[in-house]
Amino acid sequence: MSGPFLQSTDERLGYLVHLEPAEMASFVRKDYEILSSRFRMNRHFYRGSWHALPDRAAIYLGTRRADFTFSWFAYLQAYWAIRYSQALAKKSVVVLGGFDVCRDEDPHLSERLASIRYILRHSSVLLAVSERVRQQALEIEPSARIQLIYHGFDADAYSVGLKEPIATTVGYVRRGNLERKGLEVFVRAAARLPTMKFFLVGAWLDDSIEYLKSIASPNVTFTGFLSDERLLDLLRKTSVYVQASTHEGFGCSLAEAMLCGCVPVVSDRGAIPEVVGDSGIYVSPLEAETVAKGIREATLVTTLGARVRNRVATLFPLEHRRRQLLESVEDMF
């Protein structure tokens, strides 16, 4: 599946090679829009092993027409984009997102090690969204040259509303995320704080939603997918945002919640400390009691909202990512 060319100011053609359309998260769309503001862009969604030959043929043809390929995550779609880029003397960019290069969190990473090393050795440009991700990739391939470019956010698009006794977390609802994204511990913590409302936001991708509903107390709401507008409305009135993950490559939803003045209750895993710093409350990601205690403590901190918003607005402005991303592509030529 390919998308149309978008408005640009440069005749060079870029080719986004990405995963399934459902995996095109807001941060991937944001990079695509940034690149489209400077270059002509097209795209292909890699559908996986069942469609390997048609996918590979499409990637080859798209790469042949393009001046550079751009891939999010060091999975097979990036591997083939780089293989064909090398064969056709084209440039390639890969953004490392975290789980794709994390030995500790992906039990199947050893099966992908050869392709990951190829990506890390042969991509023209490697970008990491956090220092933690950069270090994880260097553990796999110490010779890799990886540039750190944090995610970026338009602070003016977020605002702080009148806060209510609400705790929120955001994540795809699927079995792999029950522990990894702290979804189960979030739901279990709700039973210990019956006077607060708990909202779990995210599309339901498998039957794990039935399990979560079976253990949920009456104060938990499972919203399913929410539009950006509806999610922003919820975050503006949310007092506490919970990210009890066992791994995060960055934590975009966390940063967006902080821009809405939500006090973060988080684990210290992955890149979360890079985002939160000393502006949040840290808890064990696997213990519902400590998560509930952290949420309770966060509701008593009335002065932290402006501080957490200012941290994200200062450290992770969208303009920084825009400038650095465009420079990293232009410097290849």
Image (cartoon, helix red, strand yellow):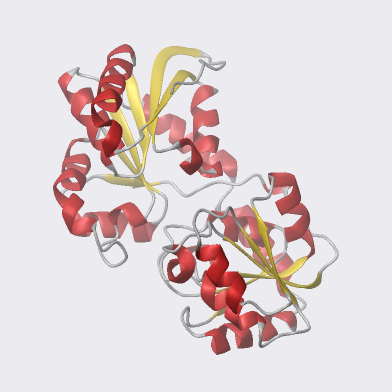
Q: Is residue 183 left or right of residue 63?
A: right
Query: In this rendering, is residue 74 above or below 51?
Result: below
Q: Camera-side residue: 1 or 301?
A: 1
Residue 207 x %, y %: 50, 61
Q: In which quarter of the image is the N terminus?
A: top left
- Quadrant in the rendering for residue 93: top left
Query: In this rendering, is residue 161 above or below 215?
Result: above
Mark count: 0
Q: Can residue 280 be seen in this view?
A: no
Q: In which quarter of the image is the C terminus?
A: top left
Q: In this view, does 154 lie to the left or right of 116?
A: right
Q: In this view, does 136 lie to the left or right of 154?
A: left
- Quadrant in the rendering for residue 145: top left
Residue 139 x %, y %: 20, 60
Residue 238 x %, y %: 75, 66
Give the residue furthest to the right. Answer: 162
Residue shown at the point (55%, 17%) measured from the top left: 6
Residue shown at the point (44%, 35%) measured from the top left: 325
Residue 39 x %, y %: 47, 19
Residue shown at the point (40%, 16%) measured from the top left: 13
Q: Camera-side residue: 313 or 159?
A: 159
Query: In this rendering, is residue 325 above or below 208?
Result: above
Q: Camera-side residue: 16 or 52?
A: 52
